[in-house]
Each structure stands twice: as C-alpha cells, then as structure tokens.
Amino acid sequence: MIAAPIQKNSFEMPQMLAGLLAFGILLFGIAAVVQADNAYRSERVERAMVRSEILAFSVTAAVDFGDREAVNRATDAFRADPNTRIAAVYDRKGNLLGDYSRQGFQAPSRLPRNNGDPDTVIEIFVPIEKAQARIGTVYLQADAMPFIQRAARFATISIFVLAASLIVLILSLGQRSLRRANADLAQKNIELQTAIETRQAAEAQLRQAQKMEAVGQLTGGIAHDFNNMLAIVLGGIDMAERRIDDTAKARSALAHAREGASRAADLTKRLLAFARQQPLQPCQTCRSYYAGHWERASGSKRSLPVAFGRPMPTRGSSKMRY
Amino acid sequence: VDPVTLPRKLTQLLGAVLLCCTPQSLSAAAPEAAVKATFLVKFLSYIEWPAGKFTSGSPVQICVVGRDPFGLVLDRATTGQQTRGRSIIVRRLSSAEGAASCHLAFLGGSGSDVQKALAAIGSRPVVTVSDARGSNRRAMIHFLVVDRRVRFAIDTRATARSGIEVSSQLLALAHNLRGGR
C-alpha cells in the first residue's frame, strides 16, 4: 500500500472542531439545566404566590371581623402542602391573627420582614384588601428546593450532556492516535520499500558477478580443451614433417592431425549447440577409440581404467542437454 | 411586598394613632356594643341587595329600630366609612314602619319588640339584625356572645326570602353554619 501524502493541517482541523463541538454540547446542557432550574424555581414561587392570594381572598371577612378561628381554619388547609413552612395571617397592624406552622417552625407574632435567603426559602407577602384598603397581610414561607435536590432533578440531562461531550472528545482523541499510527505505518512502508530495492540491486550485482565467473571458467575450460586439440593437430603435423620420407607413417600422423582438427570442430559445434540451446545428440562411442587415444597420450599399453557398460540414455532426451 | 418599610418607632406611633381613631380599635377595647356597631358596618361589604334597592348616589342606610344600645359608638363607626363607593348614614326609628328604605335594620329591645318589627318589615329587602337574648325570635343576623366573644348567626332561609345574598365569606364566619347554635 502506498501511503497517501500526509498533511499536517488535515489533522488539526477535525481535532479543533471536535473540541468545539464538545464545548458546545456542554454549554448547551448547562444552559438547558439553568433555564429549566429557573423555570422550576419561578414556577414554585408562582405557585406559592397563587396559594397566598387564594388564602388572602378567603380570609378577608375573617380578618375584617377579627375571627381568629376562621383564620386558623383557612390557614390549616396548608397542612396538605409539605413544602409550606408557615402560612400566617396578620391584621392591619401586623399582629398575628392565625397561622399554620410546620413542625419545627413558628410564625412570628409580628409581621416579619423579607429577610430569608432566596436560595433556601420562598417568602411571599400578599396584602388582604377590602374595598381597595389593606386590612391585613398573608405571609407564606415555603421551602425553596435546595441546590442538591435541584441538581438531582437535572441529573439525567447533566449525565447525558457530560457523556455526549466525553464521547466526542474520546472519538477525536482516538482518531488522532489512529492518524498517528497511520502515519507511522506509512513511514515504515517507505523504509521497507527502500530496503527491498537496495537488496534487489545487490542481488542483481551478485548474479552478474556469478555469471561473469561462470563465463570465465567456461572460457578457460574451452581454451584448455581447444589447446589440447591444437596440440594433437600440431603434434600430428610435426610428426608428419619429420617422417615425410616414410609415406605410410606420415599419412598416419596426418590422420591423427585431421582427427584432432575434427574433434576441435566437434567442440566448436557443441559450443554452438550450447549457445543456441540445441539438444545434444549423444552417440555410441567405441571403447577402442578412446583406448587408442589413451595409448597415444599415455605412451603405455595399459588398458583404459574406466568401466563402461551403463546403457546410454535415449537419444534426444531432454536430460542430456549440454 | 414588605409592608414594614418605616422604622419601627414610627410604626408604633402610627399604631398608637390608629388605636385612638379607628372603630376596629375601639372594639378591641371591648365594650360589646362597640364590637356590634363595627360589625354592623362591616356586614355591608358582604351583602348583596336585590337590584333596584339603590338609587344612584344614594347612601347606605343603617337603621336602629326601637331601643338604641349603641349611642355615639355607631355614629363614630360610620363616620368617614364607605361601602362600594357609597357613604353610610345612620337613622334611628321608633318603630319599623319607616324601615322599608333601610338597607340594614338593627332591631333593638326584647324578643317581642323584635317579633313586631320583623312582622312589619315582612319580606322587604332589608337585612335585619337582632341581639335579644332568651328569645327564639331572631332576625336574619343574630348576635351571640360565645366564649366572651361576639359572634353572629345567619338565617339563610330568611335572607333568601327577601332576595338578599350573603357572601360565602360572611357565611363561613356565621356561628350557626359552623356547627354552633
């Protein structure tokens, strides 16, 4: 595989985009949670407000007539709401007329100021009016949901948003390392390619050298053979010259020379066959032929110490080339 | 919506002034008659008369028929008060004969006086109020004293006969409708 050219910029861009995307998701999640939290808080305040207004309306006559019993009956309805700490009704002068207080809380005997921490407590003041004149005040104190509980309310969406941004980040990091690994691989591939080429060149050189060596040896061998035959030819001609008076012996020596020349011709024929890659043509050779040569070459009458007798391979066998 | 915006001392001063001057604070001093007088005035806000009972611009009339237990207290309770944009006047009548134009009539005296007055008024749209003790004859609204506090009972059948509507808020305060007698 050929590695595509690696551009440095092509990594950085998706990386930055992924980071921005993760950041965007996180921002969106935070905004959604904050918005939902605010809506929920204002809804709770709104609800407390509406209840206080209903109470203010329903106790108008009771406050007007100073009927504490009726006021208490009206405020007792808040017992049903576990979030209400205090629901109290004060007269025009700010004196407590009647109240419902959850266990652990007590309505102040005078109308309180608005001094609670708005994060932990909701305080509502609603005037009780009769003919546009204020005749009293409803004071409602309710639990604002503490931050932990509100956070728990939005835990699902928070976890989802965190997970989404984490996935995006992890994916981008994974992609980054993948790209790095790819680049490493491409680099190694190039190095391998170079090594292979170097080795191929070296092998070609070696083959050339071996070829040259073989050619040298072959040439040397042929030259040696040819020299032998030339020696036979030259020796025959020499002997013929010296025994020119004895015609029969001169003829015999010349015949030897001719034979040597013809063997040289055979050799060249075989060389040509080798060069043209022609099939060899093995033939039966008489033992006595070689024995005669042996006698002349060695100058003794000892028989040729070679055992013949293995059958010749068939003519034209492909195994007998060269 | 904090109503206590003035310094505390100023508020106390204001409270002291209110204590002297308002009818409600007079009732806090607790003569029974004073409480009843302020109640009479307050009843007006929670009662609907049939259409045609009021002519435009006319004041609301509180009549005291027969013996008058209030005296100046009732006049003080109505001074400067308004109900539905109308001023309040007090009329004192020796008998119920002229009570037809009254909006609210307090029937003083004993049980037999109350009975006579009720008969005279009949089913005219007049809110009748009584406080005669030891008598079965009761007007539409009847004052009681329960646990040393002034309470009242409302006869809803009588108000319905006269075409008078009493606000549910006032009914909720009525002693008899709350389970008392």
Image: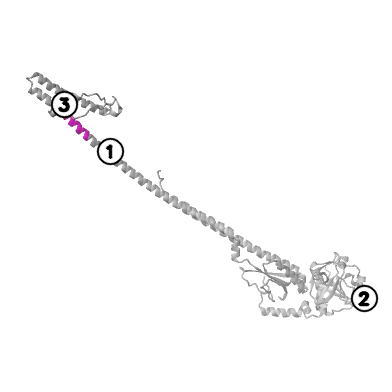
Distance CA(mark 3)–CA(mark 1): 40 Å
Label 1 element class:
helix
Numbered badge on residue B112? 2
Which portion, as a residue range, is magenta?
A216-229
Q: What's the chain of the residue with tag 1?
A: A
Residue A178, position as x, y percentages in the image: 44, 50
Q: Are marks 3 and 1 on the same chain?
A: yes
Residue A108: x %, y % from top left:
68, 75
Magenta stretch contains residue A218: yes
Magenta segment's dominant SS is helix
Look at mark 3 in the image and give the residue it sits on.
Answer: A293
- Seen from the viewer's position, the closer of residues A170 and A257 is A257
- Whether the magenta-drawn stretch holds residue B28 is answered as no
Tell me the amino acid under the disc marked 2.
Ser
Which residue shows up at 71% across the image and 68% down it?
A79
The colour scheme is one colour
Mark 3 — on which chain does it sit?
A
Q: Position of residue B43 (x, y in %)?
A: 81, 71
- Labels 3 & 1 near each other (Cβ < 8 A): no
Snapshot quadrant of residue B84: bottom right
- Mark 3 crowdedness (10 Å alpha carbons): few <14, some 14-19, many ≥20: few
Tell me the mark number nearer the camera, choosing from 2 and 3. Answer: 3
Q: Residues within 10 Å of mark 2 (few under 14, many from 20)?
A: few
Number of numbered labels in the structure image: 3
Q: Which amino acid does the dot numbered 1 rest on?
A: Arg
